[in-house]
Amino acid sequence: MKTQRLCKILALALWVWISAPAQAHVGSPTVFFQGLAGSYPVRVTIRPPGVVPGLAQIQIIVSSGEATKVTVRPVRWDVGVKGSPAPDTAVLVPGETNMYAAQLWLMESGAFSVFVEVTGRRGEGVAIVPLNSIAVQRLVMTRGMVVMFLVAGSFVAILLISVVGAAVRDARLPPGETPSPVRRRWGWCARGITAVLIAGGSYLGNAWWDNVDKDYRLNRLYRPEGIQTKLNTDSGGHRQLVLSFSQESRIDSTPLAVDHGHLMHLFLIREPDGGVFAHLHPTRAQQTDTNESVFTLRLPALPAGNYKLYADITRESGLTQTLTNNLSIPASAAGAETSGQQADTDDAVLIGTPEVLSSVSMPIGLHLAPAFSDDLRVNEETNLVFYLTTADGAAAPLQPYLGMYGHLMIENSDGTVFNHLHPLGSVSMVSQRLFAERERAGFLANKPLDQFCTAALPQLSFPYAFPKAGVYRLWLQTKVAGQILTGAFTMTVK
């Protein structure tokens, strides 16, 4: 262990350069966006670093193939474009005609957006792609690196001791003269003093490294923030869920922002089969503690069982978070309310085990069919496409639900991955809007911007790449004729 800790000092320069792929969405760090940069259809994929500072890997596909220049710029929420570095030019990937790649340093933690600027025959256009810059990893040296740095460090130390000893012993001797016993003793004394200085420097360097590592672990390394749950019964005999969490996050203490008309989007999934899915919207209770946010919700009639709880919130900085916990609904409480009536018109509950990918019948005579391969691999980018049709095969007339024509929730069966997607990707619409509003009077004054909501198309398409292998459950939600529709599927990623 002491040897390994000494080697950390020699690895400092290397650490800054290493980055690896969790942030608002649970276990799914890659950011996806498909939309418009002015009049250019673009698809942007950002793989944020696991450490901060770190390099984000960015890929941009300009579908029209008419771009002559693509630039990317990281913009932190509280400094804007004026306080941000100059944009970097994305490089055309060899052998491709419309795919560009770039790397961006994210130097600080917090809410960022990558401003993607496209120039070409259609003029200029900008797409705003929000992302969270947070440190989620503590990198560890491998055994091979330990051996390599130990050998290199030992060689340098021995060489330095030998050089100092030889310099003290022989530096002032005329050519050809043999060192006297006194000079030899001085040489050995110099070697001893140099060895002590090297050992002392290594000790102090190791202590400094440990302090840096401790500060990183305690203050900079992001840990998923939980949410406290409590089940009560109100005066009318209805079940009430009380949710509380700290208002001041370690990386962001800005107030909550309204996203799709709500401050919180709550998802309850019964474990282990996923046989119950609920998309609910708690309301904020009267605040008694300024450092704590409390939300309440009248629970609909949910079957008894153990549920995984995911709460999506967005802050005014643009930072998005998913708070998690487990919730147990006992059998006695499960039967307390039988009306099944939701407290909010945007709430929706589906009771039924997800089906293997295939066409399923929906209410009001509709059919929902997945149109993508079930043979997907880890980190393989794809579009998860669904078709919602009427009984005669015509495209169903979709209506916006919570500001979008479709929502896709994805959960790994072990609960380590949860993602809430829209047709424009995994980005938050309200984060886009907040960044745009801060730049409207300046940088974006004369530049067209994506309308934030995709058009009502015959198909619902969601860009994604599954981050790990396993069994996944997918819930698609949309709205037709004023009715919220939910379809549930299951698939295996290899």
Image (cartoon, rainbow, N blue to C red):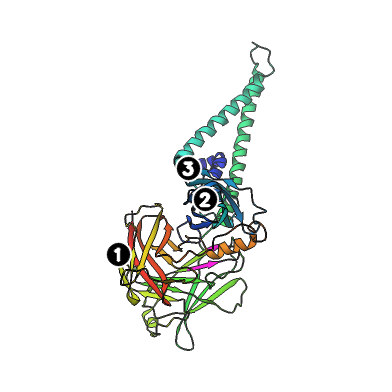
Q: Which residues are magenta?
A: 311-320
Residue 435 versus residue 228: which sits nearer the camera?
Answer: 435
The mark nearer the N terminus, 2 or 3, is 2
Q: Residues within 10 Å of mark 3 (few under 14, many from 20)?
A: some
Quadrant of res 200: top right
Q: Are marks 2 and 1 in contact (CB under 8 Å)?
A: no
**Residue marked by disc 1:** 358
Decide which of 67, 245 is in the foreground and name it.
67
Q: As drawn, is 18 to the left or to the right of 386?
A: right
- Rendering coords of residue 240 (x, y %): 47, 81
First-in-chain label (3 vs 1): 3
The residue that mark 3 highlights is: 93
Rendered position, 297 above or below 137: below
Say whether disc 2 or disc 1 marks the residue closer to the N-terminus.
2
The answer to whether the residue labelled 3 contacts the one labelled 1, judged by CB atoms less than 8 Å apart, is no
Q: Along the line of sight, which residue is nearer the eye, 148 or 451? A: 451
Residue beneath label 2, please? 49
The image position of residue 408, as x and y in percent, is 42, 65
Distance between the alpha carbons at the discs numbered 3 and 1: 36 Å
Residue 234, percent from left and from top: 48, 85
What is the secondary structure assignment of the residue under circle 2? loop
Q: Is residue 464 left or right of residue 15?
A: left
From this view, report whether residue 455 is shown above or below residue 113.
Answer: below
**SS class, disc 1:** loop
Residue 53: tell me if it is visible: no
* Place of residue 297 in the rendered image (x, y in percent of width and height, measured from the top left): 49, 78
